[in-house]
Image (cartoon, rainbow, N blue to C red):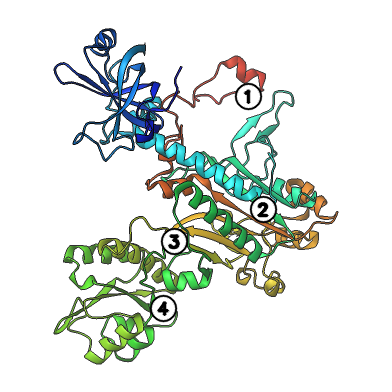
């Protein structure tokens, strides 16, 4: 039906006769000549219809926006001065001598040819129209290109794509499962996988050596901008590998795939921080390294010569920490107050400021610190004239978290976050376990199949919270892109870790007996990682939520506004799977 995509025509095509098909993006009748912008997934091209082509001209007079049409004609260079540098096809046009309307269209509920704000509920209700918009089309094509590039990069490194089951047994650990009732086995349920974690470990025991999958996963949890009940991850696992091997392969694959799909050069190697370093220097385990502003401890300086309340804040078990905002001395007062409120909301005693201004000092501490103390604080935090120093005090974890938030907000307020840059980093050596108030026991920070650092293994029985994990997270621009670990390949160590999180022998066997059994038959050392594919595409596309890079996402309430899911089902279907609804449901 067509010879070319609309957006593919270039000056080299001048003189060719082409057939195009697409949607009418714009229509202009300039008194004798009708201009149509014809759109398909590859872009736009201008179509010119003149009265000499009588039948085509008559048809063009009837078409409206979003009509689907077929155009036949000759590619010509646009007359000098009429080129459109904003279009890839802006130097050519098609002089049509044939135009056929393939489908008429009603007026859309929102404009598709303008990038203007549209209520998201309307966009999702008419998602098939929303996806016609060039921005959304670009996002889905970018998603495709990144996926294909990742597959190629993994393939050349010996990874084998294996599909793991979508209907699995429940092994409760982490988020809630989506339950799937069994019709053939009354009262029994499958669940949809939160990840292929156990299956990919089993594949390593099976000798597959290197596995990957771009896989759909499901979690029945409250939603946020970067979460959906169903999402996609790049999942991989390697045998006979340590942390260095997994991190290096991940860096190589991502750098190659991103450059191939987008042309963006990714700097390697990615910086590496331990969890303790990240919390101390940036107040978060997801540090944004596109700008500096590390956090420094200044407790000793204020203890020796600081004003109240900071001197009094340096008590046993508490700290004073600060950071410098380059050029921040000129921040408006309201922005400084907003930063202080952010710190107080996080549980600190407050936020003190010291501005290094020409001829003196400003901020809340400007008249309370001596010149010598100001100089020592500036040296400690790397501040210079024109900078603003921010200080918070209280318990160490509270201060770290508060200054982590303040650091990001201050960098944004001061315009220090560079646009269009991509900074990866690794955070390693997370705690293996953490207390859970909800469950009243210790739980795994990542998952209970993560190996402890060998140097800390002896602490499992005596100081479990001091045990560090052979775990690592990948961060991109302050967003957690994924995480992984070296897995437990030893049957006895796996039982020991299960015991540390309160899983007795019987319960561990009930939940994970197949894994424990597999580990008895010769498991190689192995590790891997799972990367949030939706988040990766979101960041590379410059979007704020993953809904903008998923074809048919759910709302934050977990509903599909286009199809109406979830819906009630016929009572006969419920009877078939042996389910009865509670009264009132």
Residue that appears at 56% across and 42% down:
148
Q: Please report contact status of discs 2 and 3: CB closer than 8 Å, yes or no.
A: no
Look at the numbered disc 1 and give the secondary structure of its residue. loop
CA gap, disc 2 and disc 3:
24 Å
Separation of residues labelled 3 and 4 (CA atoms): 32 Å
How crowded pointer 4 is (Cα within 10 Å; few <14, some 14-19, many 20+) is rated as some
Q: Earlier in the sequence, mark 2 or mark 1?
A: 2
Give the Cα distance between marks 4 and 1. 55 Å
Q: Contact (CB < 8 A) between labels 2 and 4?
A: no
* Residue found at the far right of this picture: 521
Locate residue 239: give its quadrant: bottom right
Q: Which residue is tagged 1? A: 579
Q: Which residue is mark 2?
A: 157
Query: Camera-side residue: 249 or 263?
Result: 263
How crowded is the residue under tag 3: few (<14 C-alpha within 10 Å), some, or many (20+)? Answer: some
Q: Which residue is mark 4?
A: 318
């Amino acid at each position: 039906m067509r010879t070319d995509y609309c957006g593919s025509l270039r000056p080299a095509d001048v003189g060719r006769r082409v057939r195009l098909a697409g949607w009418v993006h714009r229509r202009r009748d300039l008194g004798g000549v009708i201009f149509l912008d014809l759109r398909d997934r590859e872009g736009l091209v201008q179509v010119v219809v003149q009265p000499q082509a009588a039948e085509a001209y008559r048809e063009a007079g009837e078409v409206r926006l979003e009509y689907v049409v077929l155009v036949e004609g000759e590619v010509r260079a646009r007359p000098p001065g009429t080129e459109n540098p904003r279009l890839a096809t802006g130097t050519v046009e098609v002089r049509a001598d044939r135009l056929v309307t393939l489908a008429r269209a009603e007026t859309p509920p929102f404009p598709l040819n303008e990038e203007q704000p549209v209520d998201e509920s309307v966009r999702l209700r008419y998602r098939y129209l929303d996806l016609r918009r060039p921005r959304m089309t670009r996002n889905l094509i970018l998603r495709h290109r990144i996926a294909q590039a990742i597959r190629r990069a993994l393939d050349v490194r010996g990874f084998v794509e294996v599909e793991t089951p979508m209907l699995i047994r429940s092994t409760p650990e982490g988020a809630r499962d989506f339950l799937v009732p069994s019709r053939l086995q009354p009262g029994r349920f499958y669940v949809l996988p939160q990840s292929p974690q156990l299956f990919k470990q089993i594949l390593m025991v099976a000798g597959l050596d290197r596995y990957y999958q771009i896989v759909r996963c499901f979690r029945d949890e409250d939603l946020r901008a970067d979460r959906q009940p169903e999402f996609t991850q790049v999942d991989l696992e390697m045998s006979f590998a340590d942390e260095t091997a997994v991190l290096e392969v991940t860096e190589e694959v991502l750098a190659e795939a991103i450059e191939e799909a987008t042309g963006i050069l990714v700097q390697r190697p990615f910086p590496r921080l331990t969890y303790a370093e990240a919390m101390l220097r940036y107040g978060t385990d997801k540090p944004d390294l596109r700008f500096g502003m590390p956090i420094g401890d200044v407790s000793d300086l204020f203890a020796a010569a600081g004003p109240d309340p900071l001197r009094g804040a340096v008590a046993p078990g508490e700290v004073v920490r600060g950071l410098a905002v380059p050029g921040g001395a000129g921040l408006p007062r309201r922005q400084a107050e907003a930063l202080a409120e952010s710190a107080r909301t996080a549980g600190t005693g407050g936020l003190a400021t010291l501005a290094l201004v020409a001829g003196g000092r400003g901020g809340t501490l400007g008249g309370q610190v001596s010149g010598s103390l100001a100089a020592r604080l500036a040296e400690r935090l790397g501040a210079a004239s024109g900078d603003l120093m921010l200080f918070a005090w209280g318990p160490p974890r509270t201060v770290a978290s508060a200054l982590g938030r303040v650091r990001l907000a201050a960098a944004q307020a001061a315009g220090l976050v560079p646009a269009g840059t991509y900074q990866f980093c690794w955070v390693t050596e997370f705690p293996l376990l953490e207390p859970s108030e909800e469950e009243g026991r210790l739980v795994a920070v990542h998952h209970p199949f993560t190996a402890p650092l060998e140097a800390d293994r002896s602490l499992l029985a005596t100081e479990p919270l001091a045990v560090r994990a052979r775990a690592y997270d990948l961060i991109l621009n302050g967003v957690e892109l994924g995480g992984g670990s070296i897995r437990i390949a030893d049957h006895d160590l796996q039982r020991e870790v299960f015991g540390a999180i309160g899983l007795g022998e019987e319960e561990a066997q009930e939940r994970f007996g197949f894994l424990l059994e597999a580990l008895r038959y010769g498991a190689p050392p192995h590790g891997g990682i799972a990367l949030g594919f939706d988040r990766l595409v979101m960041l590379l596309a410059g979007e704020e939520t993953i809904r903008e890079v998923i074809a048919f996402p759910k709302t934050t309430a977990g509903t599909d506004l286009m199809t109406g899911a979830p819906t009630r089902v016929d009572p006969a279907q419920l009877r078939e799977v042996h389910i009865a609804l509670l009264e009132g449901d």
